[in-house]
Amino acid sequence: MDGEIDLESVTRVAIETIVEAHEFTFTTLRTSPTWAFAKFDIPRQTQTRRRGKPALNIDIAVENVARTQLKTRLASLNPLVLGEEYGDEPLTPTLDLTGRDRLIILVDMVDGTDLLERNLWNWCSAMIFYYPKMRKAEDRILASFIGLPGEGVYFARRDRAKVLKATVRRSIENGESLLRIDTMVVAGPSSVETLAQASVSFYGQKIPNLFSVALKEDINASLVPHAFAKNMLDLQKTKPATRIYNLAGNPMMMRLIDDGGLGHTRIDAVFDLNGQLPHDAVPGLYIAHRAGAILRDVTGSVLTPELLAKKLMRPASEEASEKVRYVVSSSKRLCDELLDYFND
């Protein structure tokens, strides 16, 4: 099967699907904002969003647009399209794709719906293609795509050494609207090596995630300052240039590997101590790795492509051992320093 997959065609379909999904999203928000942000009111398939979080109409509609495009344009590959809302199979915590002899496309077309609701731009569309039947785990991920609305689509492919950013524009030829795709190699991570000079981001929008770097329980179940908070207080005494942002995930991983082609200051590290489900984190982690970023789990172990592929076999598993607790950084030295800061 692997030899039959034309990754050039897959790439074009993925990029165009993401761009058209973004166009659909903004058109819908402009014409039907109340409907877009209303809770989805049609009974869903046997598939429950984790923790009972309700899907919105825009979540369902955009995923259906993307799924239809992928199933139609890649029909010869007979892909299994999985999504958080509606997929070919329910994306449940027990889903196990180990050994599946089929191309899997895992999508999240509005990754960060809460940000879209609030008109904040740190949301994205994520899409990853993988083939569980491949004998070598490191070969299972074929391509990964992260689309930032209004900016472009970042992608990494197994058969290419470089991570690229695609920018897309529409043109009219003979009365037909066409998408023109231009690509450029991303700059890669910064050269920052110390926390005192770093711009760092973590997912801190929800209370448990904020507390993950602020407070923890001691052996008496009493709340005490987390090691990271204590160490940052000590660092502050040196008047560092450190900046901390509480937006993270796939979009910030792209900010880590790219300066936008304009020399913007990059994010130097992204981390999550509580852990994300594999389908939420692996698309961005794979691209960041291929762009030269350092990937570790919070114990210090290397997050290899093989391990990322294995995580995708159970993409929605909520077991603690399956969640991805990670540090992505511009350098090994910075990564090691952050890991030290997480521990007393």
Image (cartoon, rainbow, N blue to C red):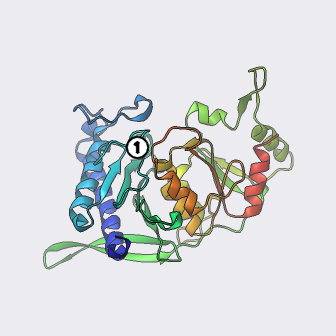
Does residue 183 appear to the left or right of 306 in the view shown? Answer: left
Question: Residue under circle 1?
Answer: 95
Quarter of the image containing the N terminus?
Answer: bottom left
Q: Residue furthest bottom?
A: 174
Q: Residue at x 34, y 72 (%)?
A: 5
Residue type, label 1: Leu
* Residue ID at (34%, 50%): 82
Residue depicted at x 62% and y 69%: 292
User: How many numbered marks appear?
Assistant: 1
Across and down, in percent, residue 321 comes to 59, 42
User: Is any part of residue 78 visible from this angle?
Assistant: yes
Q: Is residue 214 above or below residue 270?
A: above
The reply to whether residue 258 is visible in this rendering is: no
User: Which image quarter is the C terminus in?
Assistant: top right
**Local SS, label 1:** loop
At horizontal 45% and vertical 50% (from top left) the residue drawn is: 123
Residue 168: x %, y % from top left: 35, 70
Compared across the picture, whether 95 is left or right of 275 comes to left
